[in-house]
Image: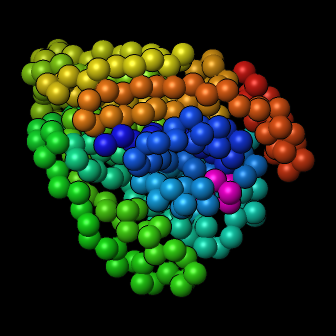
Amino acid sequence: MTYGIISDIHGNLTALDAVLDRLSGVDRFICPGDIVGYGPDPSECLSRLRSLDCISVLGNHDAAVSGTMDPAWFNPDARAAVLWTRQVLSEIDARSLSLLPMKYEEDGFVVVHSSLWRPEEFHYVISPEDAKLCFGEMTHLQHLQAFPAREKECETTETLPEKVEARYYPTYCQESAAGGSICFIGHSHVSEVYVQHPPYPSSAKARQESFGQLSAMGGGVDQIRMPEGGRLDLNPGLRYIVNCGSVGQPRDGNPEASCAIFDSKKMTIEIIRVPYDVRTVQERMRRAGLPETLIDRLGYGV
Ligand SMILES: [Fe+2]
């Protein structure tokens, strides 16, 4: 099975379409959150993911736009984009965002927006110490590739307006405990991979180590930055956190859209950078009255 990983799309339809073109032929799509916010085409991006039956989880911008999180702690530009996005989204689109689960698991991998450690607090994973906290929540899960795919229909579907496609929801509602040896995340908009080597510390011990209260007792973590993309062969004996970077607003110094292909049979992950027409997106943002800082940063990938 091949999966196209598309995270932090942030309402950038031009980047999303370029990425989908590059990923044509994959079996399934996964979005680790932040479908909307910042960009000028939130409704269209949601529509694309619906048509792909994309596995998606809740990002902090999705939560803020849908009203399940107070955007007060966002910086002023991000907050302005959240408020603008609220105005242009339909009630059904906003409701669909509010129903996204915090995490999703299937066949040995788990998807979460920020970190498995207190996912509802949206902590960043940008260092090996952050990664240890996330890995710590995977400690009790050793059955790589042993998860049966869940087929259960989500009851919430029945309560939604009829015109919402029912198939949009069952996947979203398969929330459960974290599982597998690979965790797909987004949030930082930086394409990189963390690798943890055994012996793995317990969850509590990982927490203590990360807060500097214990010396390392196994579970060392390597950080591999991949701003230009690249391919990794995954070792089934190790654990991975994979951040495929951002489709719609990269922040690793490379303005090209970022995405990944995970091949669960060959056990490979390939991070791919895809050029797109940044200027037309900037023009649409300007016409929409979105903050100039957000427009400028797209051109630099910061
Ligand atoms: Fe994001």
Q: Give the answer, above or below, for where 284 lies relative to 66.
A: above
Q: On the image, which quarter does residue 219 sit in? A: top left
Residue 74 x/y as whole percent: 63, 44
Towards the viewer: 207 or 93: 93
Where residue 170 appears, as percent x and y from the top left, is 38, 68
Q: Residue at x 53, y 85 (%)?
A: 162
Q: Quadrant of the N terminus?
A: top left
Q: Nearer the viewer, residue 74 or 254?
A: 254
Q: What residue is rendered at 71% in x and 31% in y?
A: 276
Compare residues 274 and 266 and report the one nearer the observer. 266
Chosen colour scheme: rainbow
Question: Residue farthest to the front?
Answer: 25
Side of 275 where 223 appears, left or right: left
Residue furthest to the right: 287
Residue occupying image coordinates x 31% and y 60%? 175
- The number of callouts visible is 0
Residue depicted at 25% across the width and 35% down the height = 265
Residue 83 at x, y percent in the picture: 72, 56
- Residue 122 lies, with reference to residue 241, above or below; the image says below
Q: Is residue 77 left or right of residue 208?
A: right
Residue 209 coordinates in the image, percent (x, y): 22, 23
Residue 210 part of the magenta segment: no
- Quarter that holds the C terminus: top right
Q: Which secondary structure is most common in the magenta stretch?
A: helix
Judged left or right of residue 140, residue 286 is right
Q: Is residue 201 visible?
A: yes
Classify 188 as above or below 160. Answer: above
Residue 141 visible in the displayed image: no
Query: For the magenta stretch, what is the residue range?
Result: 42-46
